[in-house]
Image (spheres, helix red, strand yellow):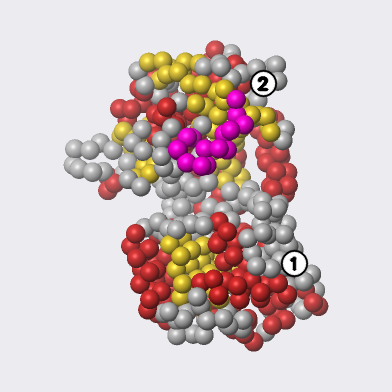
Amino acid sequence: MVISPRYIHGTAADSKFSGAVDLGSPINVFCFGGAQEVGFFHEYREGVDWVFVDHPSFHRPGNPYGDKHGTFKDNQFRFTLLSHAACEAPLVLPLGGFTYGEKCLFLVNDWHASLVSVLLASKYRPYGVYKDARSILVIHNIAHQGVEPAITYSNLGLPQEWYGALGWVFPTWARTHALDTGEAVNFLKGAIVTADRIVTVSKGYSWEITTTEGGFGLQEILRDRKSILSGITNGIDVTEWDPSSDEHIASSYSADDLSGKVKCKIALQKELGLPVRPDCPVIGFVGRLDYQKGIDLIRQAIPELMQDDVQFVMLGSGNPIYEDWMRATESLYKDKFRGWVGFNVPVSHRITAGCDILLMPSTFEPCGLNQLYAMRYGTIPVVHETGGLRDTVQNFNPFAGGSGAEGCNAEGTGWTFSPLTKESMLVALRYAIQTYNEHKSSWEGLMKRGMTRDYTWEKAAAQYEQIIEWAFMDPPYC
């Protein structure tokens, strides 16, 4: 069963719920000073029960977390409802004529569902309910923790004696004024101290979140639970992201026949109004325009990089300062730089297929998917050595032993750089550019090694099954 809010944004995207039927089984959940009525919609598809929690607070324009004015101010209320409803769904919804019952596993994603783990421990198990259930917390980005003032704890529908599970105190430097005690509730912390297992979206990230630099204040608690902390790299949809059948790109190609790759490059140059130069290395960036993605580093490096014989293409939206910079840079380097402000799925496919190099200078990256898409499309990633980027991109070594592609004794699928500086990034990019220009057989080996790697969810699913097995071997943690 997948449980999610029934987000209605008033757009064409709402049609994805068209197959979901109202079960006519509303329930009351007790939080925020009274009984809150929520409904359930259900669709059975491809062996999965999709359950959508319905409440007016999920019906508004924007995205699941906010709109153009910022994050929604009632997100604590909205995701408290979701967590309570998720705990009740297996007990009360007769899907296919039967309820799921008490012996089940809750896979809890990020702070938005973290209250589930706390509710199991505090509200259900003390009364003999869900005594055989387990919860696994999956952390995609520890920077987002669901922190609100301590006074809001009374709204959450939890026993007063469980305040310590969510209780959080900001360090002195982070407080707003001299009289601020820094006391807060932290949803993610609550799940960390009550879940049976904790998983992050890459092995590297599972280590980073236990460090002062990467833990965002939760590192000590995570170090205490290190024995049940694992990292599993996300898979990708290899049907949607397949250069041999991708309907969004100009020409299909594969590891066995790379001839369509250059056609995709020429089509991209034409579409963006760049000079059509099949032999000129094209560097791409696809992602959110914010500090985490390393945009500041790209801004610093562009004047120097534009002196080289390259073309640079960026697609993304986010911080208006970065969006304006992209527009200004395009007018300054008309024959070398293009910035597409916004996000467009077909264009992201065409950039991934048409570029030779994908740049990802992220300050931190829990998993990262664009480098996986890039390698699948024979586009060579140049990435900052952090989190999932470190795990998934093997640094190119032209002198390695063993047999590589085309009989070349090489290994690796891209370039990684560290520390996170403009100079370090430019060195890695120029290694890539030089290899592209001067060592075509090595470049083809890089492409083929990346394209033939296993990026499927089957590999990740097998690792999740092992974690689930371990969770049920031990008694409930709380």
- x and y, in percent, of residue 179 in the image: 19, 38
Mark 1 surroundings within 10 Å by alpha-carbon count, few (fewer than 14), some (14 through 19), many (20 or more) = some
Mark 1 residue element: loop
Give the tally of numbered discs: 2
> In the picture, which quadrant includes the C terminus?
top right
- Residue lying farthest to the bottom in this orientation: 438
Q: Is residue 273 left or right of residue 130?
A: left
The amino acid type found where label 2 is placed reads Leu
Front position in the image: 29 or 264? 264
Mark 2 surroundings within 10 Å by alpha-carbon count, few (fewer than 14), some (14 through 19), many (20 or more) = some
Per the rendered image, the range of residues in magenta is 7-21
Q: At x 52% / y 42%, what residue is drawn?
A: 13
Q: Name the residue carrying label 2.
A: 95
- x and y, in percent, of residue 296 in the image: 39, 67
- Residue 417 seen in render: no
Dot 2 or dot 1: first in sequence order is 2
The amino acid type found where label 1 is placed reads Ser
Front position in the image: 45 or 212? 45
- Residue lying farthest to the top in this orientation: 127
Above-or-below relation of 370 to 466: below
Q: Name the residue carrying label 1.
A: 254
Q: Is residue 172 magenta?
A: no
Q: At x 57% / y 53%, what residue is drawn?
A: 367
- x and y, in percent, of residue 259 in the image: 73, 75
Q: At x 51% / y 21%, what residue is drawn?
A: 39
